[in-house]
Amino acid sequence: MVITAEIAPIEIDTDGVARVGGTRVTLDTVLAAFQDGATAEEIVYQYPSLGLADVYAVIAQYLRHPAEMEAYLQRRKAEIDAVRKQNELRFDPQGVRGRLLARRAAVGI
């Protein structure tokens, strides 16, 4: 029997976002589900493009290196918040429902 070390299947895309197992599922998504109490099997059920072994490897990486993983998650949260603020400045979220209803009424739907 030969035992080899496995590398967590985490790839960083061109935007600096970590994705799992060659899929579009982000590391943030997998870890958020795990932190919310989901098992690896439940995460794979929610995201069928993920492999069970890959999810376990990501969870193991998170448990072995919590400080680095939390730093990444905090950085991603800050980036997401910044994008959300930019979008809210560009597209005022106040009164969206009213504008959509007015647009619907204008076209007679």
Image (cartoon, grey):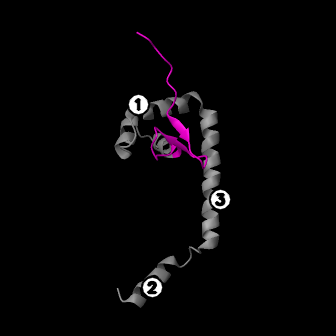
Residue 11 position within the rendered picture, expressed as x and y whole percent measured from the top left: 54, 39
Disc 2 residue type? Answer: Arg
Q: Residue 81: which quarter of the image?
A: bottom right
List x then y, in percent, for residue 96: 51, 77
The kind of residue tagged 3 is Ala
Residue that carries the numbered disc 1 in the rendered image? 53
Query: What residue is rendered at 61% in x and 69% in y?
Result: 88
Residue count near mark 3 (Cα–Cα under 10 Å), binned few <14, some 14–19, many ≥20: few
Which residue is pictured at 64% across the width and 65% down the height?
Answer: 86
Distance between the alpha carbons at the discs numbered 3 and 2: 29 Å
Residue numbers of the magenta segment: 1-28
> Gap in Å between the C-alphas at discs 1 and 3?
33 Å
Q: Quadrant for residue 102, please give it.
A: bottom left
Q: Secondary structure at mark 3?
A: helix
- The residue wearing badge 2 is 103
Secondary structure character of the magenta stretch overall: loop
Whether the magenta-drawn stretch holds residue 32 is answered as no
